Image (cartoon, rainbow, N blue to C red):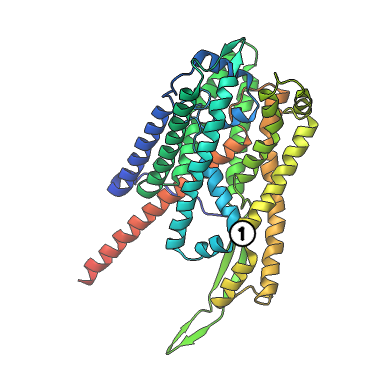
Amino acid sequence: MNQVSGVGALGNIGKIPELKSRILFVLAMLIIYRVGAHIPVPGIDAHVLAQFFSQAKGSLLGMFDMFSGGALSRLTIFALGIMPYISAAIIIQLMTVVSPRLEQLKKEGESGRRKITQYTRYGTVFLAIFQAIGMSYGLETFSVNGESVVVDPGTMFRFMTVVTLVSGTVFLMWLGEQITERGIGNGISLIIFAGIVAGLPSAIGGTLELASTGEYSPVLVIGLFAMAILVTAVVVWFERAQRRITVQYAKRQVGNRQYGGQSSFLPLKVNTAGVIPPIFASSLILLPATFAQFTKDVEGMGWIADVAALMAPGQWLYLSLFVGLIVFFCFFYTAIVFNPKETADNLKKNGGFIPGIKPGQKTAQYIDDVLTRITVVGAIYVSLVCLLPQILINQLSVPFYFGGTSLLIIVVVTMDTMSQIQAHLMSHQYEGLMKKARLKTR
């Protein structure tokens, strides 16, 4: 497996007005997002809500609160976060495999992409309405020591909550699209990134506080931070790792000119599925704990609490199912986003072939075999990265805010954004060279 070349120096960002304005635009939009994450929904007792979420740690609510940057635990206008959009996008992407109509739109280029984006927006609004209705009814049932989370429950509270939460999600969706179009990097990913990073100061502060009180020795704290840096370096290495398949292009004679004959390569990422497997696996594995939290006071539903106890974080059943789900989704999502047969057909149409492999079906089979082998490596890597924080948190009681999923998101988004910045710098340098060449010609 080869490594992609590293990012070069970024000291010239300030010298390029367009790139500078794009980065400043992104920062301004993220500031707006963080301000909105502190504007609460009316009708909520903030003190009781904070107590409830302190009891809900380790459930699905806790994971969603992490992705929303604490907006859910404060029940702000961005409490639903951008998760409805991500869910809608994943559902639409899955449907392109089974729906001929969506598959055709995917192949129509820019016009098809706009139509799929429109469907994704509709799906986002539908999911946001569904989740907001469920949350408004659920909030009225939440209580801590006899105190209700909702100050004045009723129809008006539900209507106001649904309108507020759906509007917040739609605004975040618009904000993400604006960042993608007028800023730098993927807007939706940057919003999730900002929400997760917002908890970094409190995570570091909590660890240092334990060291200052004597609960942890300074050596242990230094070792934990060193391990965090090491794991981050491993994640960066694997996220940049590729398996390059050599591709040879046949020579073609067009008039008096000869084309082709050069050699290239087909890059296959080790972790093609990205952060989707741990996100899906975390959601499914935490459902029993979440249901137990909601039904703990319901008569006849105690068996859910028993199942949740067996699947508590750190238990062997939890770890086994978590790894199994990650491996499953690594293969499942890779099969969706990468089609070996389509790749082999495109190579054949462009006169490309893999040396020693017949074009067509044999090429598709070879690419599929290579992809399967590297996906095994990628699944093992993702599983280990996600298990290590679990072991630290549960065995050593380390107050780490970041799990494997959040660490993957941070690294992947950072690398993608830096790559796009580097591309803008390279484009600017190329334009400068072309201008000098034209001046010399004159």
Q: Which residue lies furthest to the front in this view?
A: 155
Which quadrant would the N terminus be assigned to in this image? Answer: bottom right
Which quadrant would the C terminus be assigned to in this image? Answer: bottom left
Left or right, residue 83 beside residue 218: left
Left or right, residue 52 beside residue 22: right
Percent position (x, y) of residue 327?
Answer: 72, 47
Left or right, residue 113 beside residue 390: left
Of 80 and 10, the residue lying toward us: 80
Residue at the spot 50% in from the left edge and 50% down from the top edge: 6
Percent position (x, y) of residue 161?
Answer: 47, 27
Q: Which amino acid does label 1 sit on?
A: Val
Residue at the spot 68% in from the left edge and 45% down from the top edge: 381
Residue at the spot 72% in from the left edge and 48% down from the top edge: 328
Q: Is residue 380 visible?
A: no
Q: Mark 1 points at which residue?
A: 97
Helix or strand or loop: what does disc 1 sit on?
helix
Compared with 264, 93 (above or below) is: above
Which quadrant of the structure image shows residue 320? top right
Percent position (x, y) of residue 139?
Answer: 56, 23
Q: How crowded is mark 1: few (under 14 residues within 10 Å), some or many (20 or more)?
A: some
